[in-house]
Amino acid sequence: MTTVLGYHSADEFFRDALTAAMQRERIHVSALAEFYLTTLLARPAGWSARSGLPLSTRFVQAIGMPHTSAERARLLREVGDDALTSFVWWQLESRRRSGSLALYRHLGERAYLHCGACPFHELGTKFRRISDAMARCGTALGALRPPDVLRLYELWAETGSEYAARAVTELGLFFAGSGDAHD
């Protein structure tokens, strides 16, 4: 079997990247949630269930459906998935995406919480920390260039991401004041 970078599959590669990022962010998720997140990461870059409608519009449409609707659950899961994966690929897509990462974080959290079922409730309750781990995965997958460092700073300034604050500090940049834009 042919291997790339010592891995037999994309799932194996992304599982290791996710595990390292989760350990670094000090977050633990269930095996089912880890499997689900690995599957999200292993999708081709830029893959999305997007229907062409903004994330917020899709969220409102889903919330307006009956609670027992399978279509409602599917749409909420897709909103959560798209919001979460936006943190992985934010460096690559920051110029193309519309909407703020803070809004994506809020919508993704709410969407997963409204799904209610495993592993989505767990993903919703831990969304902020998981999105930091996903951003770490995205950073690890590409070399940082000066514009990427600026995007890390923007991620911290916009969302208060603990990961982004640590990453920028590790690069030798320091924050004025208390170090937290979200005091």
Image (tube, grey):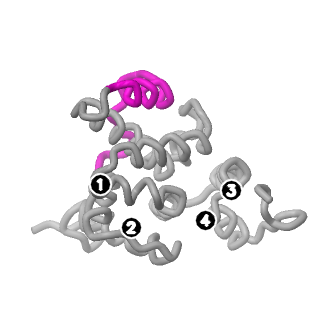
Q: Which residues are magenta?
A: 43-65
3 or 4: mark nearer the eye? 3
**In which image quadrant can residue 98 be found?**
top right
In the displayed structure, would residue 20 be above or below residue 93?
below
Give the distance between the C-alpha atoms of the residues marked 1 and 2, in whole angstroms: 10 Å
Q: Which residue bears the numbered disc 3?
A: 160
Packing grade of label 4 (10 A; few <14, some 14-19, many >=20) is: many
Are the residues at dot 2 and dot 3 in contact (C-beta closer than 8 Å)?
Answer: no
Are the residues at dot 2 and dot 4 in contact (C-beta closer than 8 Å)?
Answer: no
The kind of residue tagged 2 is: Leu
Tell me what residue is drawn at x 43 percent, y 22 percent: 53
Q: Earlier in the sequence, mark 2 or mark 4?
A: 2
**In which image quadrant can residue 165 be found?**
bottom right
Q: Which residue bears the numbered disc 4?
A: 163
Are the residues at dot 3 and dot 4 in contact (C-beta closer than 8 Å)?
Answer: no
The kind of residue tagged 1 is: Ala
Give the distance between the C-alpha atoms of the residues marked 1 and 4, in whole angstroms: 21 Å
Give the distance between the C-alpha atoms of the residues marked 3 and 4, in whole angstroms: 9 Å
Q: Secondary structure at mark 3?
A: loop
Q: In the rendering, which numbered label is found on residue 18?
A: 2
Q: Which residue bears the numbered disc 1?
A: 42
| Residue 74 image offset from top left, x and y in percent | 27, 36
Q: Earlier in the sequence, mark 1 or mark 4?
A: 1
Is residue 75 rendered to the left or right of residue 145?
Answer: left
Q: Secondary structure at mark 2?
A: helix
